[in-house]
Amino acid sequence: MITWLQRAADQVNRTDSELSRVVSAIPRSPFDTAMKAASTVANHGVLWFVIAVSFAARRGASRKAAFRGVLAVAGASTVANALLKPLLPRRRPAAWELPAYQRVQSPPLSSSFPSGHAASAAAFVTAVALESPRLGMAVAPLAAAVAYSRVHVGVHWASDVVAGAAVGTGVALLTRRWWPVRKTDEARARPVDTVPMLPRGAGLVIVSNQRSGDPNRDPADELKRALPAAVVVRAERGRDLDAQFDEAVTAQGDRVRAVGVAGGDGTVAAAAAVAARRSLPLVVVPTGTLNHFARDVGVYDLQEAVDATGSGQAVAVDLGVVDVHSDSGADSDSDIVRVRWFVNTASLGSYPDLVRLREKWQPRWGKWPAFAAALVVVLRRAEPVATCIDGQWTSVWFLFVGNGPYHPRGMVPAWRPTLDSGLLDVRWVRADVRFSRLRVVVALLLGALGHSTVYVQREVTELGVQLERPGMLATDGEVVEEAGRYTFRVAKEPVPVYRRDEGRWSGRHRPFQP
């Protein structure tokens, strides 16, 4: 075995030497200056951080690519420079064997194996390509130039560069363990063929909430221009949204064929409740800050809503329901005092604070990094909540209930692959385990949250929860209730939500653009 390894190493060294001789024989040209510049500007990852800053200036896939790229560069640089170089020392090529016009001033003195520049270059371009193949293709030639430049200027052997590139690529791919890649927002859902066509919005009552998203933008005027036959109602400040929806729909009587909403997730939940109670299809126009529900459904702007309503295309979407019980201690449907609806998530304990911090930081950092940072902060401040979950008492830091199974399992919930599963995704972090907060943070950092004893996940159709003391309920990121007992369930019938058939319109799914 040792003899085989020695022969393989000798062959690699001979190949490296031969390639270095070929490179040193290249005639002098402006290419030498370009290679020295590429090698220099990539020192300490500066080149990749500058490019990442330019990518981060734009929201969406570009910003996510920037954050993933920086994360990958940091990991690859640590593995290559702090771990492998000390463990696998190797002498660098002799500078005197290269012509002076190829050499750089002050060549590095650390181990030659592997190339840290190549590791960072490969890590950045691979990570960027995971989020945006188009940006990855644009950066790839520069990354290749940086990697090759280390051989051209004589500070690395070719095998150092190959090994460094392999390390960088591996680290970039490994980021998916902590930060899953989502190629498309649009979740799967079965088509509904029975919804009416609404040409120019005829038969549609749509409520516009100008308080969602940009406070300086009132989408009502855009709605009237795009859907001139629809009844557009501006949400009134200080009034209950459910009451306003019901009032607007009742005023139109039998002429109403669909309910619509322009707003964020909280406003959408109010409209969905009206649609479910009245057995009407729902039209969603995303005008909120994050628009999680609209992105999951696959409606990205007003024009897509116009196209779907005009052609009568929709999908079946489950709704989450929370029955709020009185504190009398009875255990029957007769003690239900209120019913709350949610389209994305509901939560108890410290989860509302976690959502608030995540949404505050998400536009700058991206969803997963913001969630991880918010989780650490919230766990440090949180108080445990004594909770009875389906008849078994335990102590939790928070309880999460998703309207449908979220992906990935055993990690931070990121997105829904389906909208009509008929299931709730229930997750909680236990507080009755010694060092539970430290354990969950360590498990999160190791990408092993699903294997931790403090993290529990179930998929159910109904869940009963009782609190030792009345606690706050948050639905779709907004605190809406305080009570001591709740029942979470999936609505009996899904709501048809207008969504155009992407295959019919463009032949492909729209790429991920948060």
Image (cartoon, helix red, strand yellow):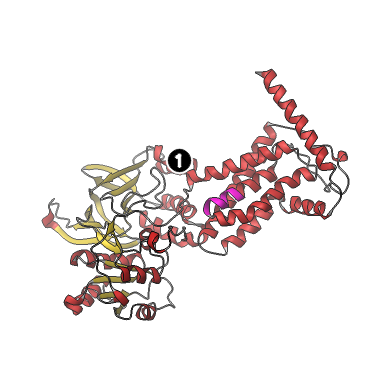
Left or right: 323, with 409 as reference point: left
Let me know if residue 127 is in the magenta part. yes
Can the viewer see residue 4 in this picture? yes
Residue 20 placement (x, y as % from top left) = 80, 38
In the rendered view, does 316 fall on the left or right side of 76? left
Type of the residue with mark 1: Ala
Q: Is residue 281 magenta?
A: no
Residue 465, relative to residue 212: is it above or below?
A: above
Q: Position of residue 366 (x, y in %)?
A: 49, 57
The residues colored magenta run 125-131
The residue that label 1 is drawn on is: 443
145 or 322, which lies in front? 145
The residue shown at (76%, 40%) is 156
User: Could you tell me if residue 263 is visible in this image?
Assistant: no
Q: Name the magenta segment's main secondary structure.
A: helix
Quarter of the image with the N terminus in it: top right
